[in-house]
Image: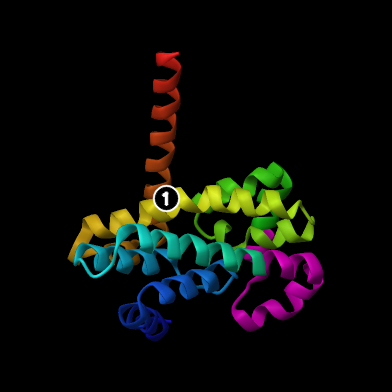
Amino acid sequence: MEQIFQMVIDFIDIWGYPAILIGMALESANIPIPSELIFGFTGYLVFLGRMDFKLAVIAGVVGGLMGSIVSYLIGYYGGPTFVLKYGRYVFLSEKNVAMAQKWFDRYGLITVLVARLLPVVRTFISLPAGFARVNFVKFVLYTILGSVPWTIALVYVGMLLGENWPTMRTIGHEASLVVAGGLFILAIYYIIRKRSTT
């Protein structure tokens, strides 16, 4: 996996925005490429002035949406049996699918939005949405709404860390939890502030 991760970094370093798009499309289509790796290095390139922050975020969101749609369609047309039978060929474990299914069964379509902030679950949540054949337009909308703040936050953290961006990769999912916690606190602050002004 270490060699694959280095290939991802080199790919982004050479090809820039298209590489971010492709990397996030693969990650959102259940291929185990950590978004912390993609966006951490992307943020570092923004720090160096080699990338534009807004364009990097757009590439990440569009790529994530493309991969999520592919995953949704696989779930929609293939169903659980197909996914569990052939998923192992792309490192898709039954445990991860079951975890995403559990979240979806408990919270329904809103999970598509919320799960974008959660490690592991966000990668696989499109499958149970496809299994359930939820409304496609709502699925796309919730995917975008969940992906935008997540992408902005991870790229921004990578940019703030600068040369220390590998920290995000080292602590992996823990970095995601920290970012998710920060986004949650900001959301609560926004709600409280809005209520106090009305």
From the top left corner, tell me how far across and down residue 143 is, in percent: 59, 53
> For the residue marked with disc 1, what is the amino acid?
Leu
For residue 69, side relative to residue 15 (left or right): right
> Of 117 and 88, which appears nearest the observer?
117
Give the quarter of the figure containing the C terminus: top left
Which residue, given by chain and number where applicable, does mark 1 sit on? 177
Residue 33: in sight, yes or no?
A: no
Q: In the rendered view, tell whether residue 34 sits above or below residue 7.
A: above
**Colour mode of the rendering:** rainbow
Q: Which residue is found at the position 68% from the left and 77% from the top? A: 87
Residue 197: in sight, yes or no?
A: yes
Q: Is 81 covered by the magenta stretch?
A: yes
From the top left corner, tell me how far across and down residue 41 is, in percent: 31, 69
> Of 78 and 89, which appears nearest the observer?
78
Which residue range is magenta in the image?
Answer: 71-98
Give the quarter of the figure containing the N terminus: bottom left
From the top left corner, tell me how far across and down residue 168 is, in percent: 32, 62
Tell me the quarter of the picture where residue 56 sits: bottom left
What secondary structure predominates along the stretch shown in magenta?
Answer: helix
